[in-house]
Amino acid sequence: MSEHELSYDHQPRAQWKSHIGFILAAIGSAVGLGNIWRFSYLCYKNGGGAFLVPYIIALVVVGIPLMTLELGVGHKMRGSSPLSFARINRKWEWCGWWAVICAMFGIMLYYSVVIAWCLNYVFFSFSLAWGEDPNGFFFGEYLKLSDGPFNLGSISIPILGALLAVWFLCWVVVYYGVEKGVERANKIFMPLLLVLILVLVGWSVNLEGAAKGIAVYLTPDFSLLSQPHIWIDAFSQIFFTLSLAFGIMIVYASYLPRKANLAKDAVIIAIGNSLFSLVAGFAVFGTLGYMATIKGVEVSEVVKESIGLAFVAYPQAISLMPNFAEVFGVIFFVSLVIAGLSSGVSLVEAFSSAMIDKYGFQRKTVVTFTCVIGFLGSLVFATQGGLFWLDIVDHFITHYELVIIGLLECLVIGWVLKAEVLRQYMDDVSSTNLPKIWDFCVKIMVPVVLVVLLVNDLKTEFAEPYEGYPVSALVFLGVGWPLVGLIASIIISKAPWVRESPDYEI
Ligand code: PHE
């Protein structure tokens, strides 16, 4: 065993009990709230089936190469994202921190709140509590939305209770470690989620008018492919949906045994995740087709973006179900909770493992501390102004911070560690060989694509303030949030590693 396989206290690094356990955990991270509503909505908005063209191109050109890169570097360096970067070169350790800090204190703080809403909605489904007006119910009665991001107001008790439950569940899973916590939870979560989604799909496609909705979801309109925003949507969706650039796949791969078919695993995870999205779309659009038929309107009139779709359009459709509406509602929101939790767990794990690697703290202490701070931090998104904060932070992190971290990853790993070296390593530990073109993808193609993406995004950003928010709020939250993360990353990366000593390099 090489010294890199030892953790700080010279214990062997934790390992997945089974290969399938690893695959399920990685798919569990990738399949999240975004797969259920975001993918279907993007398909609909961007030319139906035609959107699959840029989507699949993005998957092949950026998604799979980057997934392979993250798995490869985590496996070779046997560490969380900061440790892996530090082992490439101490100068770049901060990149690894930025990824996990962005995961934990960027995404997870608001992601946990959305899971909490889903949890509340599981209970609302029992009585179809949203009544005749799901829109008024969600924004008014439930969120009690304030008039803007600078007016936070108070925190409502149901959201607080659900949020506590969400953090508690994440805490329990990560507390018990890789094998007994993350692996075991995903072995329950993922098959359960698949069954629930298949039930929903079977149910939805048999509703009256479902075919009309599905036709809207998938009818290709290839003429739209000439518009650049469709390509931007496809590439950013691939990033977010595969949980790339958060250091998650890096740490998950670090728990694999020495022999591993990393490129094959990357393909399985990526395709598994996309298939899940595609299938879930049938449930979403089948139901919307039914609702449109019952209300005698066009399907396009009932389709809403993201949050509106899950918490407004869908509840309305549930209320209109001919039989067992409550059961349908419960299944839908339980699916969202499970999909969200398995992603949430991976976000907490990515940060916690980094702290364990760096400071040698006990897992249980780190995870408890992280979840308490995480819970407190997420409270701001649970206030009456929280939705505005969520919207702004999410927009800037997913459009810019993520893409920049992805770019840094490619450049540092492609050019400093060298793609050829990593590819050689992956070939050595696996039974198949990675094609040489992968080097070109990582060193040149993906960075170029990401820069084009960034430039185009920035152009629209400067054209008008995002969603008409005050510029001060956009700068404070959108720019300030990632910047604080970056500064924290640089500061932490300057501190020594606990096991570092004159005769032991990390
Ligand atoms: N991939 C998840 C989704 O599609 C979101 C996520 C992003 C989860 C980053 C973990 C890390 O919803």
Image (cartoon, rainbow, N blue to C red):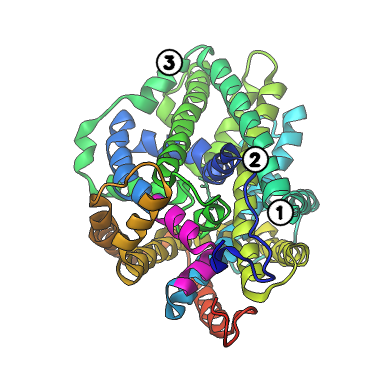
Which of the two labelled residues, at mark 2 and mark 3, occupies the earlier sequence position?
A: 2
Give the magenta-colored segment's residue range.
68-87
Residue corresponding to mark 3:
211
In the picture, the disc for residue 400 is none
The magenta stretch spans residue 99: no
**Which tag, 2 or 1, sits closer to the chain's start?**
1
- Relative to 122, residue 324 above or below: above
Q: Of residues 26 and 322, which is closer to you in this image?
A: 26
Q: Which residue is mark 1?
A: 177
Residue at the disc numbered 2: 186
Q: Does 220 sit above or below residue 413?
A: above
Image position, residue 225 (x, y; %)? 22, 39
SS label for mark 1: helix
Give 196 or 62, whichever is nearer the viewer: 62
Mark 3 or mark 1: whose residue is earlier in sequence: 1
Which is closer to the viewer, label 3 or label 1? Answer: 1
Q: Say left or right for 481 vs 414.
A: right
The answer to whether residue 474 of the structure is visible from this angle is no
Q: Disc 3 residue type?
A: Ala
Query: What residue is rendered at 60% in x and 67% in y?
Result: 354
Relative side of 433 to 14, left or right? left
**Residue 71 lies in the magenta stretch:** yes
Q: CA distance from mark 3 to mark 1?
A: 45 Å
Measure the alpha-carbon separation of dots 2 and 1: 12 Å
Amino acid residing under circle 1: Gly
Q: Crowding near pointer 3: few (<14 within 10 Å), some, many (20+)?
A: many
Secondary structure category for the residue under label 3: helix
